[in-house]
Amino acid sequence: MKYHIDEILRKAMDADASDIHIVAGHKPMIRIHTKMTEMEGYEVLTPDDTHAMVKHMAGPEQMERFETQRDSDFSYAVQGLGRYRVNAHVQRQSPAITMRAIKEEIPPLASLNLPEVIAKLTYLPRGLVLVTGATGSGKSTTLASMIQEMNTRYNKHIITLEDPIEYAFKSENSVIEQRELGCDVPTFASGLKHALRQDPDIILVGEMRDLETTASAITAAETGHLVLSTLHTNSAASTVERVVDMYPTGQQNQIRAMLANTIQAVISQQLFKRCDQPGMAPALEIMLATPAIRNLIRENRTFEIPNVIETSRAMGMQTLDNAIAALYFNGMITKEEAVAKAVHPDKLSRTLAA
């Protein structure tokens, strides 16, 4: 190996990079507060370089999956640096690697600049809580901090199903079991089915990515468990629609009724580069399952959900644009950044100019 991956990771950590990209034909690249930057001191990597790095990090099962499926997700830990979420894949017939740095310490929920209502969700006894957003929007950190909050408060049994395991929890007052896809369990759906026989109180499902997983998660929430999961959607309304659309047409009315009964909250999250100090700031759309929201889901009127969120601020709900505006008025993000990621850019632009 011309360059050792651990050396690259050490320099990336010193630069405060969140992501590392290793691609044959390029120098190593890192992402620092949303901006892609070429690492200095390296030559262009060859396919042999990138393949050697994959082989160094992947275990036998992950390497076999990479060789057969041309894609493999796993975690990698380096003493003194921390843990990384890794995706090894093939592009232009050469191995490539994308890595996301995972902080070893789970940040306290109070340190994440999230609305107070997020902490209140950790007191829920049962139901379904979904944290949504694009890749890199901070979903995993939000969920990990919520789980850690419950870990220190309750004497409960918590099971996580992850692909791969990101934050490593230590059981405190609760007992936490973490199961990784490919190593401990074949699929989310299989892990969730068997988790229900393992006497859990709280279940974290890494992603509701297919019908079987989604159906099992809703069933678990229906039967008295608190289930937390993610979807790659960008709003509460689109999240509800995505869940319903996973089902065949003939079952959609039934699932709307089940979802209306079990859903507790949908949190849609985006991250913004801060302009007042180094780091990122989250903006959240928050939908809480009030009777009005449950009726809209049941009656297939999801298009009205944004209006209810807008008029329910006193209950802790908020639209994404209101959250973005708050970041701007608090001097944390620029106007350009705010408008670029707004749901209604023209309307928000007028609000910020007022």
Image (cartoon, rainbow, N blue to C red):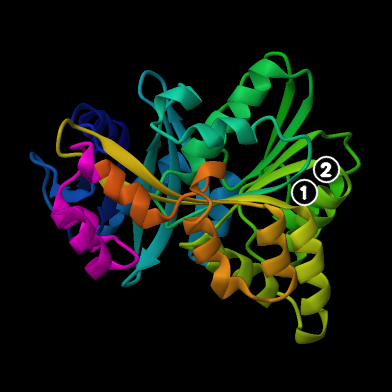
Say which residue appears at 85% left-offset and 47% top-offset.
Answer: 194
Q: Quadrant of residue 281?
A: top left
Secondary element under disc 2, as helix, strand or loop, is helix
Question: In the rendered image, which residue does mark 1 sit on?
Answer: 191
Residue 53 location in percent, x, y?
Answer: 35, 45
Who's the residue at 83% across and 73% down the image?
254
Q: Are marks 1 and 2 in contact (CB under 8 Å)?
A: yes
> Which residue sits furthest bottom?
249
Q: Give the magenta range.
A: 328-354
On the picture, is 255 further left or further right than 143?
right
- Residue 257's tag is none
Q: Relative to residue 250, is residue 234 depicted above or below?
A: above
Residue 353: within the magenta?
yes
326 versus 122 height, above or below: below
Asked whether 59 falls inside the magenta stretch, the response is: no
Residue at which label 2 appears:
195
Q: Position of residue 10 (x, y in %)?
A: 26, 28
How far apart in space, not on screen, are marks 1 and 2 (Cα)?
6 Å
Residue 332: percent from left, percent from top: 21, 38
Circle 1 packing at 10 Å, graded few (<14), some (14-19), many (20+), is many
Determine if residue 319 is in view.
Answer: yes
